Image (spheres, grey):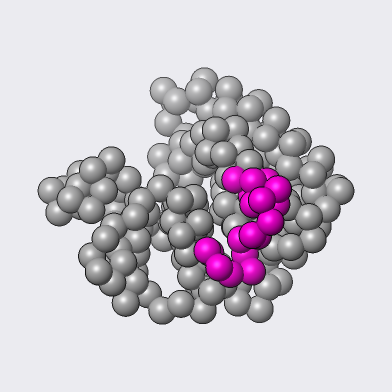
């Protein structure tokens, strides 16, 4: 059986949980507390030398890490990963966007507010993250005003990738009320019959 090592509150880990449910795959979840240093133990570092969650352990003991790479592995051959080269490249385009232009701002702001409780020494950093985070939301809004999903009409791992932290962006101080395209998209993603919530 597949094994997932992760933190239930982590958006990167939630991507894997959501994908597994969308595909109807059985798995075991092993909770890892990042704040207690559990990603720095020798046992964990043997699974991911980079010391981060999530990790997907396959039945043969192979460990995969980096959430978006794991999504590509899981979705290969499914409806959630297009085979047509242009569409598949657009999926990757959004995944690279998430890791470089979205997650470093929206997820980090959420970490400072939700995990750390907005400590005084990180307030200036937090405020700077807001500007760049809203820029990422603006990019998503433009696309979602044109198409129901990030890559056209089909729900794909591009949506899983960006849903994870966008749907909890308010926990990082982001107000989505001015983003009707994103709000409608969040509802579409959550309405999938095999959808599972972050803490379900």
The part of the chain drawn in magenta is 75-92
Residue drawn 58% across the image and 22% down it: 128
Vertical arrangement, residue 191 with respect to residue 151, above or below:
below
Q: Where's residue 70, x and y in %?
A: 44, 56
Most extreme residue toward the right is 146
Residue 173 shown left or right of residue 143 in the figure? left
- The quarter of the picture where the N terminus appears is bottom left
Residue nearest the viewer, comparing 177 with 155: 155
| Relative image position of residue 95 (x, y in whole percent) | 58, 45
The relative height of residue 97 versus residue 162 in the rendered view (above or below) is above
* Residue ID at (50%, 23%): 125
Residue 183 visible to the viewer: no
Residue sitting nearer the eye, 38 or 113? 38
Relative placement, left or right, of 166 versus 39 is right
Question: Is 109 or 50 nearer to us in this picture?
Answer: 50
Q: Position of residue 32 (x, y in %)?
A: 29, 57
Instruction: Name the image quarter holding residue 143.
Output: top right
User: In the picture shown, does residue 134 fall above or below 41?
Assistant: above
Q: Is residue 27 above or below residue 4?
A: below
Q: Position of residue 168 (x, y in %)?
A: 59, 51
Count every numbered label the image shows and give the total: 0
Residue 47 magenta-highlighted: no
- Classify residue 108 as left or right of residue 95: left
Residue at x 75%, y 36% (from the top left corner)? 138
The answer to which quarter of the image holds residue 185 is bottom right
> In the shown orientation, is residue 48 left or right of residue 151?
left
- The residue positioned 60% from the left and 45% from the top of the image is 92
């Amino acid at each position: 059986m597949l094994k997932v090592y992760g933190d239930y509150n982590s958006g990167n880990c939630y991507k894997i949980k959501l994908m597994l449910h969308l595909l109807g795959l059985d798995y075991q979840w092993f909770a890892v507390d990042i704040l207690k240093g559990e990603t720095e133990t020798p046992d964990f570092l043997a699974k991911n030398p980079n010391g981060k969650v999530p990790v997907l352990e396959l039945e043969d003991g192979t460990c995969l890490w980096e959430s978006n790479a794991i999504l590509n592995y899981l979705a290969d051959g499914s409806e959630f990963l297009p085979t047509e080269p242009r569409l598949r490249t657009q999926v990757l385009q959004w995944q690279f966007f998430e890791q470089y232009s979205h997650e470093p701002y929206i997820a980090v702001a959420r970490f400072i507010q939700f995990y750390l409780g907005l400590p005084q020494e990180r307030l200036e950093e937090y405020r700077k993250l807001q500007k760049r985070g809203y820029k990422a939301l603006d990019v998503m809004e433009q696309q979602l005003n044109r198409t129901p999903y990030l890559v056209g009409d089909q729900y794909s791992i591009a949506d899983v990738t960006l849903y994870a932290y966008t749907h909890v962006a308010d926990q990082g101080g982001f107000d989505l009320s001015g983003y009707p395209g994103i709000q409608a998209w969040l509802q579409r993603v959550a309405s999938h019959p095999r959808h599972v919530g972050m803490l379900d």
